[in-house]
Amino acid sequence: HAKIVSKGSIAFFNRQLEKKATEKHILEQELRNALDMHAFHCALQQKVDIRTGAIVGFEALARRVDRHGIMHAPMTFLPLANELGLLNDITDLVICDLERELPRLDARFGAGVRYSVNITPNQAANMQFMQRLVEQLRNTGRPESFMLELTEESLAVTGPFQSHVLPLLRDAGIGLSIDDFGTGYSSLATIADLTVDELKIDRSLISSIHNRPRSQSILRAIESMGTALGISVVAEGIETMEENLYLMAQTGLRIGQGYLFHKPQLLTALLQETPATPRPGHDRNNREPA
Ligand code: C2E
Ligand code: MG
Ligand code: MG
Ligand code: MG
């Protein structure tokens, strides 16, 4: 088969590889520059009690802000940052942003709301990083105002997370939330054992409820389990009034997060905006394109 690979096609193949390598190199340079410039910031998205409209918490989401002021979502930098071991520095910047603005956030939303920070499986398995993170949150003097959002992959029943990290979090009063629930493979027993504080039902389950009646039964069951175990259940990705919100309410789910209520906003923008009672579908201050 070697015969059909001509010299020309090898040269072409090499050029393609080189081009890919150069593109990656440029992205890597861009990422490192952005870190040097502290160009990563914290955006917040509200978690809303759909019966009262009250804001019960916020999720912190990383954004890169370029020199034109344009925001870039995590999918544009997270995978590479993870690969290059730079994600921890990004998380540091996000938390620093949040810490700095806590007094103003308190003044605006009350001291009772909790702030969630996302952690990848790699980060969760890194004891040094997790110790530093807990220390950083303890230094705010109010670690119980924070939660960590982890995916099911992070919670392997054996390993350093269970034996070392979890006790650290518990001891500090930092909350534990399971993100993208319903997409992984952890059993309900794991959740009971872990004594998690929050479950976030993945958007993929929410977006299919209107054409999958069985999903509604599953959501109803998750909600009753949450109520029985004292776990708060959050429905992610509420985008539409009729399909998502209405059906969500039908299943008894109480806490929602999604574009229908609020889009993630940079902290600075959120704090600048004039306070208004949030009404679904009437968020005048969306700063992110749909
Ligand atoms: P996630 O933790 O599941 O976050 C929810 C994602 O859904 C966010 O995307 C949010 O902007 C988006 N979202 C919220 N409401 C809606 C909606 O109604 N419809 C739709 N289609 N999407 C909605 P984002 O900000 O792009 O973040 C993507 C993922 O990147 C996050 O998923 C999280 O896993 C990760 N991530 C974000 N920030 C950080 C961070 O600081 N550290 C780490 N380790 N991961 C992060
Ligand atoms: Mg999350
Ligand atoms: Mg999620
Ligand atoms: Mg997700």
Image (cartoon, rainbow, N blue to C red):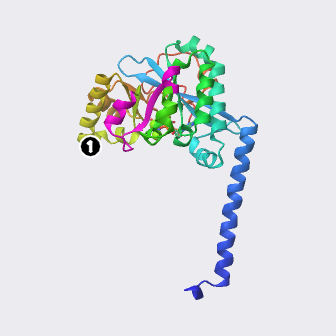
- Provide residue 63's location: percent of width, then percent of height: 61, 36
Q: Quadrant of residue 64?
A: top right
Identify whether 18 is placed above or below 162: below
Residue 141 visible in rendering: yes
Q: Which residues are magenta?
A: 168-195
Q: Is 224 displayed left or right of 14 in the figure?
A: left
Residue 55 vs residue 192, the one in the foreground: 192
Mark 1: which amino acid?
Arg
Residue 261 vs residue 151, the one in the foreground: 151
Quadrant that contains the N terminus: bottom right
Identify whether 264 is placed above or below 24: above
| Residue 127 is one of the magenta-drawn residues | no
Residue located at (24% from left, 36% from top): 217
Q: Is mark 1 within 8 Å of ligand 1?
A: no
Q: Is 198 displayed left or right of 72 in the figure?
A: left
Residue 283 visible in rendering: no
Q: Residue furthest bottom?
A: 3
Q: The residue tagged with tag 1: helix, strand or loop?
A: loop
Question: How many numbered circles does the render carry?
Answer: 1
Q: Quadrant of residue 2?
A: bottom right
Identify the residue position indicated by label 1 in the image: 212
Residue 104 vs residue 158, the one in the foreground: 158
